[in-house]
């Protein structure tokens, strides 16, 4: 796929050259994490496996799976979709972490327990604190970088531990672009010579305003032949479901999925399917043999 320059992080790619030279290539494809619920950002997740018993619950877990599918695809191939894609709130996590590593490596590193403030290109600052030679924290305070049509502003923090051919990071970042703000919180670990074996857990706010957690993520394919996504997604009240999404093609105007099928499994096995048949069109959730139209909000 061709890169779409509307993605604001395409304009940060030059800032990541140093990170790339250090082997910090974007960690795509793999995913994972602890299979637990818990609390994040004031939201408590039900850590039990869901037991779907009504069409309303079937629609709720299907929507959670739709949101997680978009998030996972965008995280896999962030530079190839415009900011309008509804899942963009978490798709740039790896790029933010890489930017943080770049800031840590830039200039003279602060000594242990010291903090070095680094200005953004268009305002704000990123404060790099060294706990030791391998453990750093970057605090973003209205940190601003130019982007297509406007400025990208980061607030929040990334805590990074560097190892031999590895890094582990926890993060809670809010970024604003063209008047819209998104938040993502979680953790990511990458290993290997090219740091391309990555696992992550991400909590995010979907386009429906609900808070979700996604783990155990794998993504393959592209937006021409369709993506395949396997993952576990936590619903705040119902608990977690596992899903497999196939033939998923994202509408680049941000109106949802053009096509694809998601099969959702609860504690009894496959319990619902979601079928997509047009950009901006309702998708159909089938539960107990009955189809229910659901908007791609």
Image (cartoon, rainbow, N blue to C red):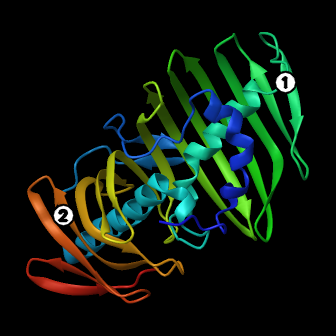
Horizontally, is 252 left or right of 159 in the view? left
At x 42%, y 25%, the residue is: 192
| Apparent side of residue 54 relative to residue 32 in the rendered image (left or right) | left
Residue 282 percent across, percent down from the top left: 35, 88
Distance between the alpha carbons at the discs numbered 1 and 2 = 54 Å
Q: Position of residue 16 (x, y in %)?
A: 69, 40
Where is 189 relative to 233, above or below? Answer: above
Q: Quadrant of residue 48?
A: top left
Q: Is residue 135 above or below residue 16?
A: above
Q: Which residue is mark 2?
A: 52
**Residue 111 visible to the viewer:** yes
Q: Residue at x 44, y 45 (%)?
A: 28
Residue matched to label 1? 107
Residue 18 image position (x, y, % from top left): 70, 33
Q: Is residue 235 above or below residue 274?
A: above
Q: Percent position (x, y) of residue 87?
A: 50, 64
């Amino acid at each position: 796929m061709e890169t779409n320059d509307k993605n604001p992080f395409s304009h940060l790619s030059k800032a990541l050259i140093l990170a790339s030279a250090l082997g910090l290539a974007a960690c795509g494809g793999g995913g994972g994490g602890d299979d637990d619920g818990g609390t994040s950002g004031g939201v408590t997740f039900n850590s039990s496996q869901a037991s779907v018993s009504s069409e309303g619950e079937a629609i709720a877990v299907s929507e959670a799976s739709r949101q997680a599918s978009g998030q996972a695809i965008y995280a896999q191939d962030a530079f190839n979709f415009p900011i309008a894609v509804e899942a963009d709130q978490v798709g740039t996590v790896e790029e933010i972490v890489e930017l943080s590593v770049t800031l840590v490596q830039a200039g003279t590193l602060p000594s242990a327990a010291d903090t070095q403030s680094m200005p953004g290109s268009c305002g704000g600052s990123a404060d790099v604190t060294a706990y030791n030679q391998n453990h750093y924290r970057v605090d973003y305070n209205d940190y601003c970088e130019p982007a297509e049509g406007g400025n990208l502003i980061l607030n929040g923090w990334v805590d990074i531990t560097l190892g031999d051919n590895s890094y582990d990071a926890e993060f809670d970042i809010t970024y604003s672009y063209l008047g819209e703000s998104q938040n993502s919180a979680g953790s990511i670990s990458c290993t290997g010579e090219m740091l391309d074996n990555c696992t992550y857990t991400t909590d995010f706010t979907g386009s429906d305003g609900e808070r979700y957690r996604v783990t155990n993520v794998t993504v393959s394919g592209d937006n021409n032949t369709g993506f395949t996504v396997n993952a576990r997604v936590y619903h705040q009240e119902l608990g977690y479901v596992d899903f497999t999404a196939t033939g998923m093609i994202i509408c680049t105007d941000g109106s949802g999925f053009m096509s694809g099928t998601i099969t959702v499994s609860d504690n009894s096995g496959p319990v619902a399917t979601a079928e997509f048949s047009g950009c901006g069109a309702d998708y159909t959730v089938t539960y107990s043999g009955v189809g229910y139209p659901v908007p791609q909000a």
